[in-house]
Image (spheres, rainbow, N blue to C red):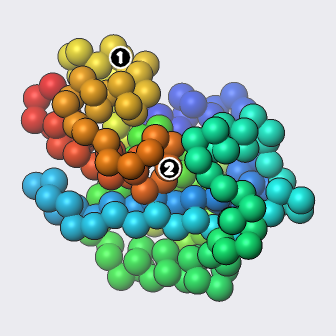
Amino acid sequence: MAAAKITAVWRQNFQQEIFRLDAALLIQFGITVADVSGNIGGTWEFNLRFDLSRDLFVSQSIQFLQDNGVDFDRLRRDGIHFYDMFAQLLSRVVARHRNLCWVTFHGLYDLSHTLKTVTNKPLPPSVAAFASQLGIVFGDVVDIKYMARFCHGLRGGELGLAAIAKILKVERVGGAHQAGSDSLLTGPCVHKDEDGI
């Protein structure tokens, strides 16, 4: 499934996408841990150091995040230093827990950043190599937006996370477009999806 989705999304502009991803920095990272039955063990949001005066960014993305509560002055001052802590922590989790199932919503960019972080290498140069590396590093990956294409009542996957959660009757905890809250909302959606929607 991952290879088919990557091919469909990126075949035409793969090199441009890789360039954009290699130049971009993560701003937030949210992760929710759940068992196979969907019982949530915890959710964490990492707010990483980001400096608007020196880091590359897309103005519309920054404005969107600011409109949704991200405080860039605080990230510059108090954000977690990426390589001192976050990259090492994430690499250890992936290395020690090979039986994880990664659940995302429209998560190709998230997985790309995570792959780059965990391997500490540039992203692979081709779609095939990229899909192969994702499979090696992460194993099982489920993308709710992709799955929604095949689920009755979810409009062929053309909805955002909040709309899909509303249809599935999953309540949000926290603010929209915050990494931790989005992560916490994504997990229960996959279990409702699997339950026959």
Tag 1's secondary structure?
helix
In this picture, residue 121 sits left or right of residue 152: right
Tag 2's secondary structure?
loop
Q: Give the quarter of the figure containing the C terminus.
A: top left
Q: Residue at x 49, y 75 (%)?
A: 90
**Given the image, on which type of amino acid does mark 1 rest?**
Gly
Percent x, y of residue 191: 17, 43
Q: Label 2: which residue? A: 178
Percent x, y of residue 65: 64, 44
Q: Earlier in the sequence, mark 1 or mark 2?
A: 1
Q: How many residues crowd around disc 1 within 10 Å: few (fewer than 14), some, or many (20 or more)?
A: some
Residue 160 visible, this angle: yes
Q: Give the quarter of the figure containing the N terminus.
A: top left
Residue 129 visible, this angle: no
Asked whether 187 or 14 is in front, the reply is: 187
Q: Picture quarter containing residue 147?
A: top left
**Given the image, on which type of amino acid does mark 2 rest?**
Gln
- What is the distance, in whole Å, between disc 1 and disc 2 at their CAs? 25 Å
In this picture, residue 62 sits left or right of residue 53: left
Percent x, y of residue 37: 10, 55
Q: Label 1: which residue? A: 156
